[in-house]
Structures are given as C-alpha cells and as structure tokens.
Image: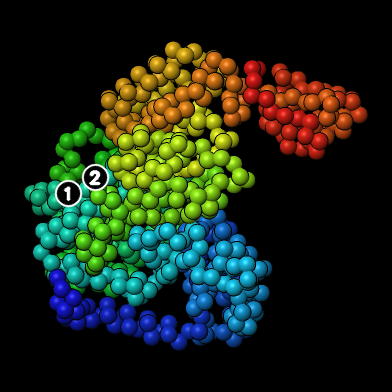
Amino acid sequence: MDEKTLRKIKERLGADIAARQAHLAKQNARFERQVLVCGGSGCSSGNSKKIYDEFEREIKEKSLVGKVNLVMTGCFGLCALGPVVIIYPEGSFYANVKSEHVEEIVDGHLVGGKPVKQLLYKETVNENGEITPLADTDFYRKQSRLALRNCGVIDPENIEEYIARDGYFALLKALNMPRDKIIEEVSDSGLRGRGGAGFLTGRKWKFTYDAQSDVKYVACNADEGDPGAFMDRSVLEGDPHVVLEAMSIAAYAVGANHGFIYVRAEYPVAVHRLQVAIKQSRDAGLLGKNILNKNFDFDIEIRLGAGAFVCGEETALMTSIEGKRGEPRPRPPFPAVKGLRGKPTLLNNVETYANIPQIILNGSKWFSSIGTEKSKGTKVFALGGKIHNTGLVEVPMGTSLREIVYEIGGGIPKGKAFKAAQTGGPSGGCIPAELIDTEIDYESLQSIGSMMGSGGLIVMDEDNCMVDIAKFFLEFTVDESCGKCTPCRVGTKRLYEMLCKITDGKATLEDLDKMEELCHYIQDNSLCGLGQSAPNPVLSTLKYYRKEYEAHIVDKVCPAGVCKSLIRYEIDPDKCIGCNLCARNCSANAIRGTVKKPHVIDPEACIKCGICETVCRFKAIKKVGGKV
C-alpha cells in the first residue's frame, strides 16, 4: 500500500485517531519542558513514585504548572542507575535520583535553566563540563530500539501519547489489507518468535489462518519465567498499547475475535497498565465491536499466572488459561490447529508482538534489512550479572557478545576478567571467553551449544564457578518441572544430585560420562521444551569447562573458591595480631585464641560464611580452595 493510499485511509477512517494525535501535539507544544520519571519496576523499587510526587509538589509550589509537563514513563533501560529522571528539550539524564534531590533539580534546572551537573549520569558530562546527548553514550550508541521504541518516552497510561507516536495506524492500515497480505508481510519480514525457539512468526500465523474453525483465538505469552529476565515486563509497563494493537492485527489476519494475555501475577505494574490500556482502547473504539468501522470484532482478556515456569510452554499456558493445572501436552496437534479450548490458537510472546506494528507500517523490507541473513530485526536482552550497566538493551541481530559486554555493558566491575555469558536462561548454555566474538543470532548461538531464549544474558567473571552455575540453573528446572513426564521429573533430579556430588568432592571421573549420557536421554525423551532444554547448562559447561569439573573431582578443589565443601579458611599467624575481631563476629564460634596472640579456625565448626575474612583489617585470613 503506497503512502497516498494510506493517507486517504487515515482521512476516511482515522479521523478520530488523527485528531487525537494533533490534539496531543498541540497540548505538548505549550510546555517549556517535559520531565519524565521512570515508573518501571526497577525504578519503582527505588521509590520513583515518591520522586514523582515530590516533583508534582515542587512544580505547583514554584508556579510551573502549565509550563512543565510531568510524566511517569516506562523503563529507560539503564536499570543500574535508577531511579532515573530525564528532562527535555535538553535531554538531561539524571541518575540515582532521590526525593531529596528534587528541589535542587527544580530550582536549578526548571527555574534557573541550568542542569544540575553533579546529579547527571556521568557519561553525559564530558571532561570540559559540557553535556553530551544521551544517544552518544556507550550504553545507547549501538542500540536500535524497535520493540522498546516507546518505553521511557511516553506515558503508558495515556492512549493519546501512544497515538502521537503513530499508535494504532498500523491497525488502521492492516484493516484495509487482505488478510493473506498481512501474513505475507509478516512472513517476508523474517521475524522469528522472540520467546525462545525462534520459529518463523509468519509461518505460525499462516498455519492458524489456514485452520478451519468457527472460532479462533489469539494469545500473548507474557509469563516470562527465566531468572533475570524482564524484557516482556518492561514492554508491558512502558508500552502496553503496542501489544494490544499487534494482537488486534494478528486477530484480524487469522480470523479470531477473542484474545488472552497470560501474564504472571508477580508483575503488578504491568497488569495494572494493561488493565488501563484495555479500558482506554475499548472506550476509543479500538477494541470491541466494529473496530474502526470495518465490521471487525475483537476483545482481550487478562489471565494471571501463578508463576509456574512450565507455563511459558505454549500448551501448558493454554491449559492454565482454561483453569486447569498448567501441564504440557504432546504435539502434534499444534496449537495452530488445536489449541485453547480445542480451537486454533495463535500464540506469540510480548516482544514478538511489539515488532508487528512497525513491520506493518514500515514494510517487511525495512525490517528484514536489519540483522543477519537468517535472524532479522533486533533482540532485547536483560543484561545482568557481573556487568557495569545492568539493564535492558536492544541490539540488531548479529551484534557480537564482546560489543554487548564491553561497549554497551561497560565491561566487568573491579577489573575482573570475563569468564562466560549465559544466554537463554535455564534452557540456554554458557558462552566461554574464547568465544566472546560470537555474533548473537539464532544460528550462531545454537552452533556453540547455547540458545537465544527469551533474552536473558547473564555475565560471569573469574570468581564464578561454572559447576556451581550449572547446578544453580538445574536446581531451578528441578523445582519448576511439572512432573508429568519421567525423563524430566526424575532425570533432572538425578542430574542435580550428580552435580551436588561433584561440588561436595565425592564424585569420580566416571560420573562425568554418566552425566553426559543422562543429559542426552533427558533431551531426547522429555515431553516439552522445559525438560528437553534443561541439560543445556550442564552440557555447555562440560564442553568448555571440563577441567574445572575435573579439578573438583580429582584435586578436590574449587578453582573459583565458591563450593563450600571444597574450601576452608585459614589464619596466617604472621599477620594475625590477636585483635579478636574475627572471633567476635563468628556466629559459629569456630575461631579460637587469646587476645594479642594468633588465632586459629576450627575446620569442623566453621560454616564457611566468610565473615571473618571480611572483617579482618590485617588481611590475615584467606580462603583456600584446597582439600578439606
């Protein structure tokens, strides 16, 4: 559809939307400044609501009402610096803001016209004291925010602001396209599911479109159970309307009239903003009956999940929506043929949907020009672990792990060495330091024993024990197994016990071969993706860090000094002055000695908490990774 045709459609059917857009633009033009306060979960936990309230009070007190527009937004991405406040038109980025800073910012910046430099994010102030654009900082320079384009930019509880950013124009355009052409556009874009498996989105839509049924459903997976993952939550908190619009487009394309968003109850901010967005969309005639006068009916309900990781698997999710215990079922039949309530169901996750409106508006060629040959577009990652810039990043597919860790992420704290990165959460694998130049896309990650997953990216340094990391993720999958199939229910438990045996210094080298054999059995025989991918952290660490496993088994040593059974604490008699500080802080009463004479640690009584090493001012206590 060319621009001229689209313009006519906007004039004919989108008069109300266009009017809303113009009204907001006119309204915002009268403000001298926009003050955006992050209202994502991360900043909210730092009491950003109190900061917002303090700004509101100061704005009234300083007679700035009508001159300053105060907005609570979604996540800006730099979660490590929260709570965050940005003031436009300068684009001044205030980091780690506290309520007591607000008066200073209002007096200096909003009244005095000069940003308070000492409170700004340090990377936005150069050595000459000049303020540089946020987009030029290391964290943002290499990012391409498509799925996150509105997060931290608009008020997520104001539909007018979403419309001002061309919101719902993609739905308007789609409703004037043949259904098969919409699916063709999604297919040609090369968009793959961002929930883990990376299945081609257009193909999934086509399967649902082709299915013959009087009733079809569209569903959104917002369960997001991976440890350390918060990509979907941030989209829902910062831009809920993009999911509603995308689901409406999908419903029209496949012939559905009802949709469900399955979101975990632990996401109260996301749930609230979805509820607000759904009501606003209904009131605006963008959900419900005869949407945009196109004889298209579609509405959405929210279903709350109880936090079961297995409900991220599509068949378990649909079973849970039906009010039953969330357990997977064998496939085929696939959900596109027989899904929710036995009817054809299209299911995508939040990030996948967040790309749809931009694909419809800008075209498949635009989207497919980003990324690699087989992995198109961008990917959002929750960057965490041993990294300076913890937060959300969105980069083109094909960006190297090195760029993410050292340029966007700011490198490893305290000058420590990069050791590994875990992608894909409990279902993924560990990427070792020698593969740090690996390009992040579906094929590259799979080829080295990892996977994209939903987008968790945990960085580890030299102080991490890779056996312990494998045990951590496996313990999670053991707890989250629904128990329906034996390979997952029993196999992961036995695998976890083998890892415990290794970290306790009780294993033999033969146990490594048994572990590998069991891993492959679990992969080949588990019913769903949870069990099939559960051994990935074990297999990848065995592949790249086998010597570390062997050190635990043969030498009874944990090289990283993490596994408690293989470490001990010793006091150097030449350094100990007998100050008794360590003994006074030892909760296990494991330290013996008299004042002004060297002390000793009773290895039998020591619980290896490390508090003695922490409090010793003379560095007389050290952790030893030798035999117990």
Tell which of 103 and 216 is nearer to you. 103
Q: On the rendered structure, is 249 left or right of 551? A: left
Tell which of 281 and 404 is nearer to you. 404
Q: Report the Cα–Cα distance between label 1 and label 2.
A: 8 Å
Query: Does residue 14 appear in this view?
Result: yes
Q: On the rendered structure, is 413 left or right of 241? A: right
Instruction: Tell me the kind of residue under disc 2.
Output: Phe
Q: Residue visible at 30% across and 54% down?
A: 371
User: Is there a contact, CB below 8 Å, between mark 1 and mark 2?
Assistant: yes
Q: Residue visible at 19% across and 82% down?
A: 11
Identify the image quadrant of the C terminus. Answer: top right
**In the structure shown, which secondary structural element does the residue marked by tag 2 occupy?**
loop
Picture colour scheme: rainbow
Q: Position of residue 22 (x, y in %)?
A: 32, 83
Q: Residue visible at 64% across and 17% down?
A: 627
Number of callouts: 2
Task: Report which quarter residue 609 is drawn in.
Answer: top right
- The residue at which mark 2 appears reads as 199
Within 10 Å of disc 1 (Cα), the crowding (few <14, some 14-19, many 20+) is some
Instruction: Tell me the kind of residue under disc 1.
Output: Arg
